[in-house]
C-alpha cells in the first residue's frame, strides 16, 4: 500500500511540473495589463520608483549584470522600457541590433519630443566617435554626444554579444551642467542599459534608464524631464527601428 502511495505521489508531482506554466521572466511588479500590452507587440515604458520596483527577474547572466549595474548606481530616477519580438524569422536579431546601435555617429538626429515645449527636437545635435576597440565578444567606444541644455556629454559605451544575450551600457564620464549654471549629474552617474535575451518563442528587449542625482524640489522635475525622457526616447528609438519580421 505504501509503495502504491509513493508511486502516485511521484506521478502527481510529475503531472504538476508538466502542467504548471514556466516561471515568468517578469516579477509581480509587472501587472497583467502591462504584460498583455507587451505580448501584443507594444513598447511598454514604466516610470519606476526604485530599484525594488524593477519588474525583471530572469536568471539570464546579461539581465543579472544589467540589474547589478543599476542597483550599484543607487539611482534617484529610474525607468524601464520593454518590448517583445518574435524569435522565428528574427534569429539574427542580436546581430542586427548590435550593428545598428553601434553606429554611434548616427545618434545625431534621433528624434526627441519635448513635453515642456510641445515640439520635436534632435536628441543629440552631434555625435562624434573618439575611440573604438573590439576584444573577443566585447566592443568598447568613447564618444562626445552634444545634448542641449547640457552641452557635451563625454560617454563610455560598451557592449557584449554572448551566446544567450546582448548587453549594452552607456555612461557619462564628465560632469553635466544645466545651461552651464549648475551641476546636475556627476561623472559615472547617468546610465543607459539595454539587454536582449531569448525567452521561449520571443526575444525580450529590456532597457533601463537610471540617473543618480539630487532629488530636491528645484531639480527633480528638470532632471526627470530632461534626462529620463531622453533616455526613454533613446531606447524606444532603437527598439522600433531595428528591422523585425
Image (spheres, grey):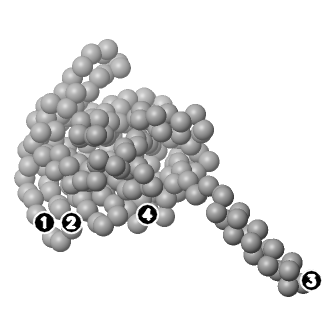
**Dot 1 surroundings within 10 Å: few (below 14), some, or many (20 or more)?**
few
Q: Which of marks 1 and 3 is nearer the N terminus?
A: 3
N-term mark: 2 or 3: 3
- Where disc 3 sits, the SS reads loop
Q: How far apart are marks 1 and 3 (CA)?
A: 66 Å
Question: Alpha carbon of mark 1 to alpha carbon of mark 2: how far?
Answer: 6 Å
Query: Does residue 107 lie above or below 196 as drawn?
Result: above
Q: What element carries label 2?
A: strand
The dot on residue 134 is 1
Q: Residue at x 17, y 45 (%)?
A: 100
The reply to whether discs 4 and 3 touch (Cβ–Cβ < 8 Å) is no
Mark 2 or mark 4: which is in front? 4
Residue 12 seen = yes
**Dot 4 corresponds to which residue?**
60
Badge 1 marks a residue whose secondary structure is strand
- Disc 2 designates what residue? 138
Asked which quadrant contains residue 163, the reply is: bottom left
> Along the line of sight, which residue is nearer the eye, 88 or 64?
88
Amino acid at each position: 500500500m505504501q509503495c502504491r502511495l509513493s508511486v502516485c505521489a511521484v506521478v502527481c508531482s510529475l503531472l504538476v511540473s508538466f502542467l504548471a506554466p514556466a516561471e515568468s521572466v517578469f516579477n509581480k511588479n509587472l501587472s497583467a495589463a502591462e504584460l498583455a500590452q507587451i505580448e501584443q507587440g507594444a513598447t511598454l515604458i514604466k516610470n519606476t520608483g526604485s530599484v525594488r520596483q524593477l519588474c525583471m527577474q530572469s536568471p539570464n547572466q546579461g539581465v543579472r549584470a544589467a540589474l547589478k549595474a543599476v542597483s550599484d548606481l543607487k539611482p534617484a530616477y529610474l525607468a524601464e522600457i520593454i518590448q517583445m519580438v518574435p524569435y522565428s524569422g528574427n534569429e539574427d536579431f542580436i546581430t542586427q541590433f548590435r550593428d545598428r546601435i553601434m553606429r554611434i555617429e548616427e545618434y545625431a538626429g534621433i528624434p526627441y519630443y519635448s513635453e515642456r515645449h510641445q515640439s520635436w527636437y534632435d536628441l543629440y545635435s552631434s555625435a562624434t566617435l573618439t575611440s573604438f576597440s573590439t576584444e573577443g565578444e566585447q566592443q568598447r567606444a568613447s564618444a562626445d554626444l552634444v545634448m542641449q541644455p547640457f552641452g557635451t556629454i563625454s560617454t563610455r559605451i560598451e557592449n557584449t554579444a554572448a551566446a544567450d544575450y546582448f548587453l549594452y551600457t552607456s555612461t557619462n564620464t564628465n560632469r553635466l551642467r544645466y545651461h552651464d549654471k549648475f551641476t546636475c549629474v556627476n561623472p559615472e552617474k547617468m546610465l543607459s542599459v539595454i539587454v536582449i535575451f531569448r525567452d521561449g518563442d520571443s526575444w525580450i528587449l529590456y532597457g533601463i534608464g537610471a540617473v543618480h542625482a539630487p532629488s530636491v524640489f528645484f531639480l527633480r522635475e528638470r532632471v526627470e524631464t530632461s534626462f529620463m525622457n531622453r533616455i526613454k526616447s533613446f531606447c524606444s528609438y532603437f527598439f522600433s527601428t531595428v528591422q523585425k519580421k
